[in-house]
Amino acid sequence: MNKQMDANALFGYGFTAYQMGDMILAIEQLEALLALDPDYSSLYPYLAKAYEAEGRFDDALEILEKGIKVDEYNEQLYVLAGKLSFKRQRPNEGERFLRQVIALNPSNVEAVQTLAAYFKHVEMYDELLELMSHVKEMGEEDPIYTWYEATALRENDDFDKALKCYREIEVGYEHDVDFLEEYGYFLLEFGKREEAKLKFQQVLLLQPENTGVSELLQNLD
């Protein structure tokens, strides 16, 4: 009982210090808790984030991996480890951690979006399509997944399917400059010049300082 009380007290001190931004004190308290009770699974994400805040990235990854061994179903640990792996230029590890959490729970939007954003950034469009197909097969629906799908289909020159995806979500993203600009360029590439102009005009209504789109519209007139 005393050990549990001490563990709870240490976690409370460490968590409070973390919330107040005192990472040195948070680390001190949470490391003490780790030594006292390594099975206290709640400590691991906060100790990892405190390490990361102090620039101790390798320590953060190490503690996340230890945490996963203690609580293999803690999705937050996998997501943190995946993001940190990408930050440390270890993309294979990052992908592995995120695929593990998606296998545990395909409805973990943060994990899916992080992996999808990585695939898009490195232009791995086949992998992006496979991921979007997988989560949809698992019954997960989200407009941003359809956007990722549209982008990948466009890059793979599957214009008809890409257009269908863009059409499906265009109402929901009518105030999103990034979507409107991407959609406009796609429509222009697809030969739908007048529709593209309408999208670029929407961009300028939301972002009048966008000189690139402004100049493009002038050339289209």
Image: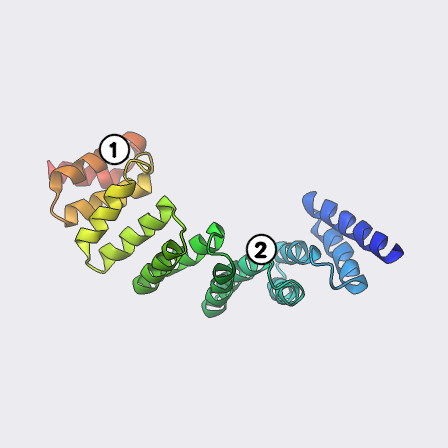
Q: Where is residue 77 in the image (x, y as percent from the top left)?
A: 59, 59
Residue pictured at 34% horizontal, 64% vertical: 127
Q: Position of residue 14 (x, y in %)?
A: 75, 50
Left or right of 88 in this view: 209: left
Amino acid, disc 2: Gln
Which element carries disc 1, helix, strand or loop? helix
Residue 36, image quadrant: bottom right
Amino acid, disc 1: Gln
Alpha-carbon neighbours of circle 2 within 10 Å: few (<14), some, or many (≥20)?
A: some
Q: In which quarter of the image is the N terminus?
A: bottom right
Residue in the foreground of this view, choosing between 5 and 54: 5
- Decide: is 7 above or below 69: above
Residue annotated with mark 1: 202
- Decide: is 141 above or below 138: above
Q: In which quarter of the image is the C terminus?
A: top left
Residue in the foreground of this view, choosing between 174 and 123: 174
Which element carries disc 2, helix, strand or loop? helix
Q: Position of residue 198 (x, y in %)?
A: 19, 34
Residue pictured at 83% horizontal, 55% vertical: 4
Tell which tag, 2 or 1, sits nearer the viewer: 2
Label 2 – label 1 distance at C-alpha: 38 Å
Residue pictured at 29% horizontal, 41% vertical: 169
Sequence-first disc among 2 and 1: 2
Residue 125, image quadrant: bottom left
Answer yes or no: is residue 144 visible: yes
Query: Which mark is on residue 11?
Result: none
Residue in the foreground of this view, choosing between 60 and 70: 70
